[in-house]
Image (cartoon, helix red, strand yellow):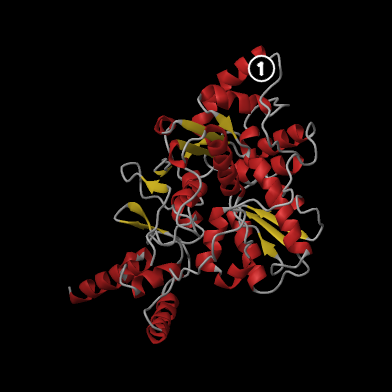
Amino acid sequence: METFFHSVNLDADLCMGCINCLKRCPTQAIRVRSGKANITKEFCIDCGECIRICPHHAKKAIYDPMSILDKYEYKVALPPPSLYAQFNNLEDKGIVLSALMKLGFDDVFEVAAAAEMVSELTRKLITEEKAELPIISSACPSIVRLIRVRFPNLIDKISPLNAPFELAASMAAEKAMKETGLPREKIGIIFITPCPAKVTAINSPLVGEKSGVDGAIAMSEIYPKLLPLMKDVYANSEGGYFQGDIEAGKIGVSWGRSGGEAGGILRDNYLSADGIENVLRVLEDLEDDKLHNLAFIELNACSGGCVGGVLAVENPYLAKVKLNVLRKYLPVSGSHLGDETPPNAFLDGKIQYMPVFRLGNSLEESIQIMQRIDELTEKLPGLDCGCCGAPTCRAFAEDIAQGHAKEKDCIHILRKFLHEFSGEISSIE
């Protein structure tokens, strides 16, 4: 079993033991024991829903501080398209890119530009029938991890392409080494992340040993620093704003919101869903063979897409509107593959199933445990109230069967026991 890195952490001092997080977790990774939430690392997919829902701010995302820039001689920023949606009245994304240069970066490489290349490669996979249809997007790390642990039969449908931020990192590093002559270790490729899932993907890649990204700074951290610099850029840039070697157009920028990636395949037979509950429903239907005649499926764990990430600043629905406004002033596509496929465009290996929900060490043992779980579930009230510290009665039965909980942790069973016990005492008296 692999060692799990996670970018979602619990501050036990702030945790009040409420059950908001465990009811929201899509993989039932959270339990409340001894008055505190506990995250089962093997189950967690770092979607950030517990961060979003916790009223006590006890769940926190881990990411790199701004001081990570001091580690490198040459720094390249990787801004995602969702970053542009955080600002009011933005009609030229060059203002944001110029502000990043003023912030201390030596160069900027748009993730949206790499996204357009991924869109082009996806269109080729579909047209040339080189992948099993429908192709499920590999862009959201939480979705890929969810499929890996809960829907193993769908792994082969995941796109073989790297997420745009990884492709952008590879291209940005190559460009920086060529232009500066510096070795790779002196160049820092820094992603501005809207969510903790991408921090996890950088520190613990699903495929391959190492990410091409050297650090991830939260969008919420960099946002207040960019605002005054953007105002300065807007007021003093007489010769225009930042112009990169590779610029993104409408297709790339649209990746920041739900439906943007799917729209980039330029076909009608696609499905796009956002929000973890909707995603689960789509994956269940796909596994049950209820979805037909689809070429592509775009799934985002966050509502609204990447603009809805827990490390973003703007309301995701307003952010989607802002991206639509920005798109009006852009060409359809600003970047193209050319004659050769860029290095690192494809995943360096196959995504493997992780049997973290396996009940026993053998089939026989698993069947015995399953039977025990079924028996326990029948005894439980079926209210799924969460008072036992598990999200559902079924999950609680699993905990009991595996020795992590006791039947009397259920307040309804405990109340019944106390009532019967008090009756026995009364009859003796």
Instruction: Give the residue displayed 49% in from the left and 50% down from the top.
Output: 211
Q: Nearer the viewer, residue 359 or 19?
A: 359
Q: Position of residue 249 (x, y in %)?
A: 75, 38
Quadrant location of residue 138?
bottom right
Q: Nearer the viewer, residue 282 or 164?
A: 164
Can residue 144 be seen in this snapshot?
Answer: yes
Q: Is residue 371 left or right of residue 26?
A: left
Residue wearing tag 1: 234
Q: Position of residue 202 (x, y in %)?
A: 48, 49
Quadrant location of residue 277?
bottom right
Q: Secondary structure at mark 1?
A: helix
Q: Position of residue 391 (x, y in %)?
A: 45, 61
Q: Residue furthest left?
A: 429
Q: Nearer the viewer, residue 316 or 389?
A: 316
Looking at the rendered image, the quarter that the N terminus falls into is bottom left
User: Label 1: few (<14), some or many (≥20) within 10 Å?
Assistant: some
Establish if 248 lies above or below 144: above
Q: Position of residue 100 (x, y in %)?
A: 56, 27
Q: Is residue 24 left or right of residue 5?
A: right
Q: Residue furthest front?
A: 181
Establish if 240 lies above or below 190: above
Can residue 312 be seen in this snapshot?
Answer: no
- Number of on-image labels: 1
Looking at the rendered image, the quarter that the C terminus falls into is bottom left
